Amino acid sequence: MTAGASPRERRRVSVRLTRDAQRQVRGGHPWVFDASITGTSHDGEPGDLAVLFDDKRRFLAIGLWDPSSPIRVRVLHRGRPRPIDDGFWHEQLGAAFARRAGLAELAAQGTTTAYRAVHGENDDLPGLVIDRYDRTWVVRLDTAAWAPHLPAVLDGLQALAADLPGAGGGGAPWERVVLRSSRQARTGLVAMGLADGAMLAGDPPEDLIAFRENGLAFAADVVRGQKTGHFLDQRDNRARVGALAGGARVLDVFSCTGGFTVHAAAGGAAAVHSVDASPHAVAEVAANLDRNHDRPAVATCRATAAVGDAFDIMAGLAGEGARYDLVVVDPPSFASKQADVPRALGAYRRLTTLALPLLAPGGVLVQSSCSSRVPADDLFDAVHQAAAGGGRPLHEIERTSHADDHPVGFRQGAYLKTLFARVG
Ligand SMILES: C[S@@+](CC[C@H](N)C(=O)[O-])C[C@H]1O[C@@H](n2cnc3c(N)ncnc32)[C@H](O)[C@@H]1O
């Protein structure tokens, strides 16, 4: 991997901001958009440190500079000036690890061995996600600005991982560290010699990475799979679905590799039908069920699956008269920009409308949105409106969010919202 200059040697870009952006940064917002910048000392390179000043040339904050991204600065620290050095990275990573002490214990016990160790902006490390899959760590970057700082991040990660419970008394804390990148960061990272799926440490895995979630066995493709290989944010909702699934006929729409499917089967579902557009993901649903075949509930559950467009498949199932006691609808984000929000809400309404005829009387709808731009209340209103319009009002069981290894540090950090509701 490319080792950049140490943070202390890196160039600094002085940045002046609009009044509104100054207020936002003071208020704790981690992003500065290109349109909020009124002047800079020079162009700078991705990963330079951006020093933000107010109108009176007073220090406001320091962050990572990315001239190739509309999010031009990601704020690392605000308030009083402080050096961004190895000690800083170690302190930030250490605070994130401390927040997951309970999960690290569960990992040592073998109950849940995969969790999010660093959640970007929400852990004051904007644009940096670190997911743990047992002894494999996946570093996912949303900006090429992290590239020059990766050696320091890896040093900090290695030291912290070595101190985790069950790390083996001085043994190697990890087998490997895999780099993943968001679509936006990919080109910049490749230009720096950092390809999506590259090993930052250790050897490439020969197989999928085995891990446990809520005591159940799974495996993730951390090199090529969606995001970092598994949607870790739904862990607690999957446990809730497992608890509701006893004896139920379950439809898992947008199943990906079957997180909800496996929990439903282990929870005693009579049958589970999984639907996703990705043939690779659907193939993994069966494999993940197999990994839990020693559980009688999983072995006796009737599992079926379909590859294709969820909207078409749900309409087709309704046409065939299929009925379920529990329908999980967990689509991808529908709003990558603010202008997409009305269309996204329309898609959520449409999904509710498609789910309702599939639900037997008294059945439970579990509908999620991971679109950060769609406010929770708007999503819940959209689902309720669609249900009421379809003549089957919903009786809420609960409204939930991500698992707590996905803390919320700013408004857009609260991206996952889920409604559990019973139909009449
Ligand atoms: C947020 S993920 C679902 C995560 C999954 N429920 C889990 O627990 O791991 C969204 C999924 O939707 C799938 N997808 C995207 N568009 C789709 C479509 N039109 N029809 C069916 N599946 C789709 C993707 O392949 C992806 O697996």
Image (tube, grey):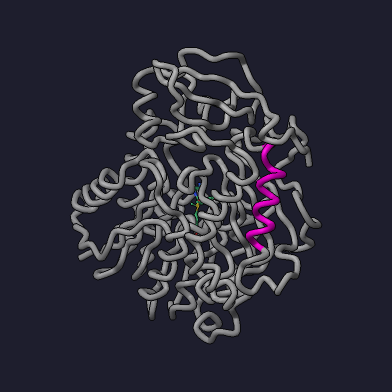
- The answer to whether residue 359 is left or right of residue 175 is left
Q: Residue 49: tell me if it is visible.
A: yes
* Quadrant in which the C terminus is drawn: bottom left
Count of numbered circles in the view: 0
Q: Which residue is depicted at the point 61% across and 60% down? A: 132
Q: Is residue 271 above or below residue 385?
A: below
Q: Quick one: 145 or 302, which is closer to the camera? A: 145
Q: Quick one: 69 or 126, which is closer to the camera? A: 126
Q: In this view, which residue lies farthest toward the bottom?
A: 296
- Where residue 374 sits, quadrant-wise, is top left
Q: Is residue 406 above or below residue 125?
A: below
Q: Residue 29: where, in percent of width, then height?
A: 40, 35
Q: Residue 354: where, in percent of width, then height?
A: 34, 52
Q: Residue 40: where, in percent of width, then height?
A: 54, 15
Task: Say if the magenta span includes residue 353.
Answer: no
- The answer to whether residue 247 is left or right of residue 174 is left
Instruction: Please give the range of residues in magenta.
Output: 147-161
- The answer to whether residue 232 is left or right of residue 338 is right
* Quadrant in which the N terminus is drawn: top right
Predominant secondary structure, magenta span? helix
Q: Is residue 224 above or below residue 358?
A: above
Q: Which residue is depicted at the point 71% across and 36% down? A: 6
Q: Which residue is depicted at the point 49% across and 44% down? A: 124
- Where residue 356 sits, quadrant-wise, is bottom left
Q: Quick one: 402 or 176, which is closer to the camera? A: 176
